[in-house]
Amino acid sequence: MRDPRVEAGEFPFFGTINDHGRRGMEAGIQEWREDLALYEDLKRAAERQLERIEAGDMEGFQNASSHREGIQARISALEERIGRTVRLRANSEMDAGRQEIRDRIRVVALEIQETDRRSLSVAKAMQVRVAQGLDQLKKGRNGVRGYGMKGPGPPKFVDQQG
């Protein structure tokens, strides 16, 4: 199904087919810049999550996670708009400004992935420590039970013929 705006000669943020002037190009670059800013916000949220998990602050971690999900939703909506326009302009070459912004977004996304990997490794280490702590607790509880029991009694059958 075709977008009626496209059939009418309009692009979502580039003006009309007959009007590819500076106004349309600036609007497109502005959305790419907004996308970059959102990715940088996402990176800061990922760093906050890492800080909170390293500090053992699970409530702070959950707050940072909620904030991050909101940013991800905004990025998805914006990229959907950008994607529609990029598909419509696929035959034209991307100008250097937009390519530079896309490259920067790629770098920020890789930094976010690295922060997420670090967060995951810290979380796994915490999980191992908690499991070991619970194991020690269980051993301690079982050890205490041994103190309340009598030692082994004398044998019931003694060999008297020896």
Image (cartoon, rainbow, N blue to C red):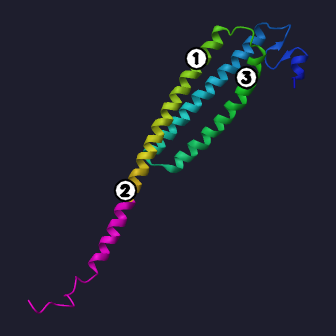
- Disc 1 is placed on an element classified as helix
Specify the quadrant that holds the N terminus: top right
Q: Which disc number belongs to residue 132?
A: 2
What residue did someone put label 1 on? 103
Position above or below: 39 against 46: above
What residue occupies the far left of the structure in this picture?
162
Which residues make up the magenta segment?
134-162
Q: Earlier in the sequence, mark 2 or mark 1?
A: 1
Residue type pointed to by label 3: Gly
Give percent across and percent down for residue 36.
62, 23
Residue 81 placement, left or right of 105: right
Position above or below: 104 against 91: below
Q: Which disc number belongs to residue 83?
A: 3
Position above or below: 62 against 143: above
Residue type pointed to by label 1: Asp
Is residue 26 on the magenta stretch?
no
Residue drawn where x is 73% and y is 16% of the image: 28
Specify the quadrant that holds the C terminus: bottom left
